[in-house]
């Protein structure tokens, strides 16, 4: 059954994409908790379709603007939650649960920067997918869509490639803020992140759909720039704090040495 269109909706802090077919719909990412009502209203009011036509919600990774609405979508529509095949939960253990709250705080910070009114962004730290997928798999019920593992931002990032049109949804792999491209934060594995960028470049996609940005044709020169300027060291909250503490220690030591010479 042929794809009718891919529609981009303005989510709470990210772009949300629906792949619309005559008798089924796929949401390319789980969005934020407040996005659930907006997406379902679009299906009912604009598409004039039953919300049960939403058959699959992908969770590309576990951050609040990509997994926040997944379980509620399933509760409302009975859809399948599809995500990466990983043995462990992203937010596992005490450290993981702490990071879960930190990430919700960061999402609220982004919302404030965008002038959004405060919303409840809480969602379960533990994802319960109905179907897990690996690199090269087709999305269940949507055989035109190929799953690509594109980690680096986290250890389980997925991209979705619509083979016939060569359009690709890259979640947070590439971010466009106003007039410039930037790497996402955090980046847990810079080497793997660069490999993921190269993989998307090698696809020669017709359109890249970004969660933070819009759908856009990205040429090889831009991909080369993204790869060249990609971080060479991890960029996580832990690493940022460590770097700032070391910088401050070095700065204080330099001042101290200067005073000794006097």
Image (spheres, rainbow, N blue to C red):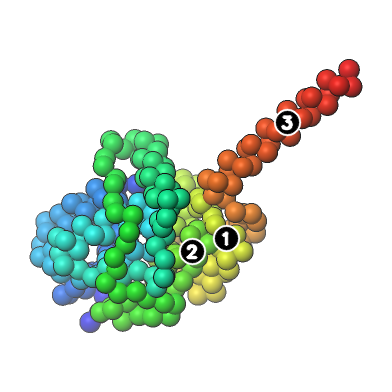
| Residue at 58% from the left image edge and 43% from the top image edge | 240
- Sequence-wise first label, 2 or 1: 2
For residue 58, what is the image quadrant? Answer: bottom left
Nearest the viewer among 120 and 199 is 120
Q: Alpha-carbon neighbours of circle 2 within 10 Å: few (<14), some, or many (≥20)? A: some
Residue at the disc numbered 3: 251
- Sequence-wise first label, 2 or 3: 2
Residue at the disc numbered 2: 155
The quadrant the N terminus occupies is bottom left
Q: Secondary structure at mark 3?
A: helix
Q: Alpha-carbon neighbours of circle 1 within 10 Å: few (<14), some, or many (≥20)? A: some
Residue 15 seen in the current view: no
The image shows residue 118 at horizontal and vertical percentages of 28, 36
For residue 206, what is the image quadrant? Answer: bottom left
Q: Is residue 237 left or right of residue 160?
A: right
Does residue 88 lie above or below 124 as drawn?
Answer: below
Mark 3 to mark 1 CA distance (whole Å): 28 Å
Nearest the viewer among 181 and 256 is 256
Q: Which mark is residue 189?
A: 1
Q: Is residue 145 left or right of residue 120?
A: right
* Discs 2, 1 touching: Cβ within 8 Å: yes
| Residue at 29% from the left image edge and 47% from the top image edge | 122
Q: Secondary structure at mark 1?
A: loop
Nearest the viewer among 182 and 231 is 231
* Discs 2, 3 touching: Cβ within 8 Å: no
Q: Secondary structure at mark 2?
A: loop
Q: Which mark is residue 109?
A: none
Does residue 75 lie above or below 106 as drawn?
Answer: below
The image shows residue 168 at horizontal and vertical percentages of 41, 69
Mark 2 to mark 3 CA distance (whole Å): 34 Å
């Amino acid at each position: 059954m042929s794809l009718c269109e891919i529609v981009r909706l303005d989510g709470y802090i990210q772009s949300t994409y629906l792949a619309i077919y005559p008798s089924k719909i796929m949401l390319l990412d789980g969005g934020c908790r407040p996005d659930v009502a907006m997406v379902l209203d679009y299906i009912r009011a604009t598409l004039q379709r039953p919300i049960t036509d939403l058959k699959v919600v992908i969770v590309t990774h576990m951050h609040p603007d990509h997994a926040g609405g997944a379980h509620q979508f399933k509760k409302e529509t009975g859809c399948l939650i599809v995500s990466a095949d990983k043995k462990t939960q992203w937010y596992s253990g005490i450290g993981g649960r702490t990071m879960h709250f930190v990430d919700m705080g960061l999402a609220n910070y982004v919302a404030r920067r965008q002038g959004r009114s405060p919303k409840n962004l809480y969602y379960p730290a533990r994802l319960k997918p109905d179907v897990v997928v690996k690199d090269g798999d087709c999305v269940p019920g949507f055989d035109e869509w190929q799953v690509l593992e594109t980690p680096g931002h986290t250890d389980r990032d997925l991209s979705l490639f619509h083979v016939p049109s060569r359009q690709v949804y890259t979640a947070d792999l590439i971010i466009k803020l106003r007039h410039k491209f930037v790497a996402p934060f955090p980046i847990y594995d810079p080497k793997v992140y660069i490999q993921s960028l190269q993989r998307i470049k090698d696809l020669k996609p017709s359109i890249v759909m970004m969660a933070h940005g819009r759908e856009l044709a990205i040429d090889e020169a831009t991909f080369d720039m993204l790869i060249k300027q990609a971080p060479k060291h991890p960029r996580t909250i832990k690493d940022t704090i460590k770097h700032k503490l070391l910088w401050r220690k070095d700065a204080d030591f330099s001042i101290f040495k200067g005073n000794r010479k006097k």
